[in-house]
Amino acid sequence: MTEQQPVAVLGGGSFGTAIANLLAENGQRVLQWMRDPEQAAAMRTQRENPRYLKGIKLHDGVEPVADLESTLAACELIFVAIPSSGLRQALQPVADALAGKLLVSLTKGIEPKSFKLMSQIIADVAPLARIGVLSGPNLAREIAEHALTATVIASEDEELCQRVQQALHGGTFRVYASNDSFGVELGGALKNVYAIIAGMAAALGMGENTKSMLITRALAEMTRFAVTLGANPMTFLGLAGVGDLIVTCSSPKSRNFQVGHALGEGLSLEEAVERLGEVAEGVNTLKVLKTKAEELQVYMPLVAGLHAILFEGRTLAQVIEVLMSGDPKTDVDFISPSGF
């Protein structure tokens, strides 16, 4: 009998590790690649990821490795969980090895200047690959601890969606399919910005009404922006839109929420990011989102407000005053006030 082909996970962070474990629990052999050979060696001996997922045992079926070329050669299905800032740089040297592979992006972010989503960067580097996007309300530690979780695999490639569903679907992890990969991926990137605002609100002791208002207006704002770029508004009513927004804006486990919370406690942005010790994608996304919203003339008051606090020296009190004095428009953009 031929030995089953392994599945690759690229990235040694918390989410990559949680997904690698999940795949192994489903009977897959997993090669988890990371750039740092020392991290790979430490994970092989300790059988855990002490830096990013402390206390979670690495499944026996996961092999941490540091040789990217041999990993790609051995696998057809590849999950990409490399931070957005290093994605293009990591894949470019091995572009030829990616042709014909099934590449699933797990990274939520937007490339500065080009405003490209992660799957678009992968398509740039590997035009002959088959590409999908995985996104949803998926906190890494909860996945690793087997909390009941659902996610969305989005691609126009139906076979790719089925392969990912077969590989990941299990007793505690449900995988739904979508063909709006642009909307699904954009939802995953945009919600990180609003999680920073929610973290600040929590640190300042704002009430449940305020939290609810923030999340709902954030959903309106990100949907308005995404639809301007061609996404399907209905995607934002699903797991990758409102589902992801709720968990990221209400959980202290969310990295972006933690950064916002630290800011709300009076730390500077540098101090907040340093305290976290890993990337909070929302900070990078905020800058590119503000520029793009202005270019497209999309009304995004929460994005403008957060940008003013982080990069323009405004206080939260000043921004709240501006937000609360704005002209209330319709509640839901796609329904006219008269109900028609």
Image: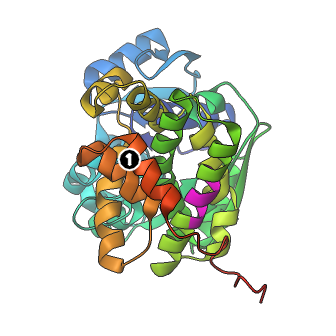
Amino acid tagged 1 = Gln
Residue 298 vertical position relative to residue 257 in the rendered view, above or below: below
The image position of residue 24, as x and y in percent, is 61, 33
Q: Nearer the viewer, residue 291 or 309?
A: 309
Span highlighted in magenta in the image: 215-220
Mark 1: give few (<14), some (14-19) or many (20+) Cα within 10 Å.
Answer: few
- Which residue is at a point 38% across and 63% down the rendered structure image? 117
Rendering coords of residue 146 (x, y %): 71, 29
Whether 214 is drawn above or below 247: the answer is below
Above or below, 83 relative to 142: below
Q: Secondary structure at mark 1?
A: helix
Q: Position of residue 64 (x, y in %)?
A: 41, 27
The secondary structure making up most of the magenta span is helix
Q: Residue at x 29, y 33 (%)?
A: 269
Drawn side of residue 106 relative to residue 220, left or right: left
The total of numbered circles placed on residues is: 1
Q: Which residue is nearer to you in this view: 138 or 146?
A: 138
Q: Is residue 284 visible?
A: no
Check disc 1 and report the residue beneath it: 318
Is residue 191 among what the camera can see? yes
Residue 283 x/y as whole percent: 34, 45
- Location of residue 241 by image quarter: bottom right
Q: Quadrant of the N terminus?
A: top right
Coloration mode: rainbow
